[in-house]
Image: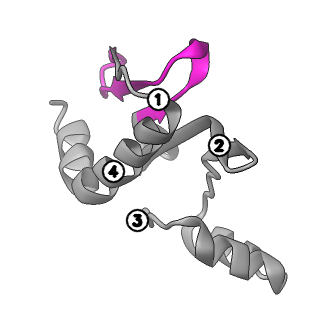
């Protein structure tokens, strides 16, 4: 199971020294963005599934390689990259909303090899 959250719960758990609770409950924690004075300077948001005794990436949005893009991964090892043509803030918002709204469909398609 993956939990999608904004930064508020993470900040509050960190303030009281309980950020490790998330790792204990969910196994993996990815902090997705870097900012400078409120401006997004880089990000990575990804959905992973635990299968065949390991975590595998299903879909990842990020700003590596100097531009915002999405990578879709398949069980057979294929990966398809799509340039987003959005600024970093817009791409991060899209990534958060898309994975939050569609994680179950992405997970199902990955597991079915689609």
54 up-or-down from 61: above or below: below
Task: Decide which of tag 1 and tag 2 comes sooner along the chain.
Answer: 2
Foreground residue among 11 and 40: 40
Q: How many marks?
A: 4
Classed neighbour count for the residue bearing mark 2: other residues with Cα under 10 Å, few (<14), some (14–19), many (≥20) = few
Task: Decide which of tag 3 and tag 2 comes sooner along the chain.
Answer: 3
Considering the numbered disc 4 on the image, is that residue within a helix, a strand or a loop? helix
For the record, the magenta segment spans 60-81
Considering the numbered disc 1 on the image, is that residue within a helix, a strand or a loop? loop
Numbered tag placed on residue 1 in the rendering: 3
Quadrant in which the N terminus is drawn: bottom left
Q: Mark 4 highlights which residue?
A: 99
49 up-or-down from 2: above or below: above
Task: Decide which of tag 1 and tag 4 comes sooner along the chain.
Answer: 1
Q: Is residue 114 in view?
A: yes
Numbered tag placed on residue 87 in the rendering: 1
Left/right placement of residue 19 relative to residue 71 reads right
Q: Mark 2 highlights which residue?
A: 39
Q: Which is more foreground, mark 3 or mark 2?
A: 2
Question: Furthest residue to the bottom?
Answer: 16
| Relative image position of residue 111 (x, y in whole percent) | 24, 42
Q: Which is more foreground, mark 1 or mark 4?
A: 1
Q: Are marks 3 and 2 in contact (CB under 8 Å)?
A: no
**Is residue 11 inside the magenta stretch?**
no
Residue at the (27%, 48%) spot, across then down? 107
CA gap, disc 1 to disc 2? 11 Å
Task: Decide which of tag 4 and tag 2 comes sooner along the chain.
Answer: 2
**Is residue 67 inside the magenta stretch?**
yes
Classed neighbour count for the residue bearing mark 4: other residues with Cα under 10 Å, few (<14), some (14–19), many (≥20) = some
């Amino acid at each position: 199971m993956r939990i999608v959250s904004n930064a508020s719960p993470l900040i509050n758990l960190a303030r009281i020294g309980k950020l490790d609770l998330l790792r204990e409950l969910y196994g993996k924690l990815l902090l997705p963005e870097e900012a400078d004075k409120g401006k997004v300077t880089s990000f990575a948001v990804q959905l992973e599934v635990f299968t065949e005794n390991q975590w595998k990436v299903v879909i990842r949005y990020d700003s590596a390689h100097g531009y915002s893009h999405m990578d879709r991964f398949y069980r057979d090892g294929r990966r398809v990259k799509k340039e987003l043509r959005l600024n970093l803030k817009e791409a991060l918002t899209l990534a958060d909303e898309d994975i939050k709204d569609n994680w179950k469909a992405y997970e199902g398609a990955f597991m079915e090899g689609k």
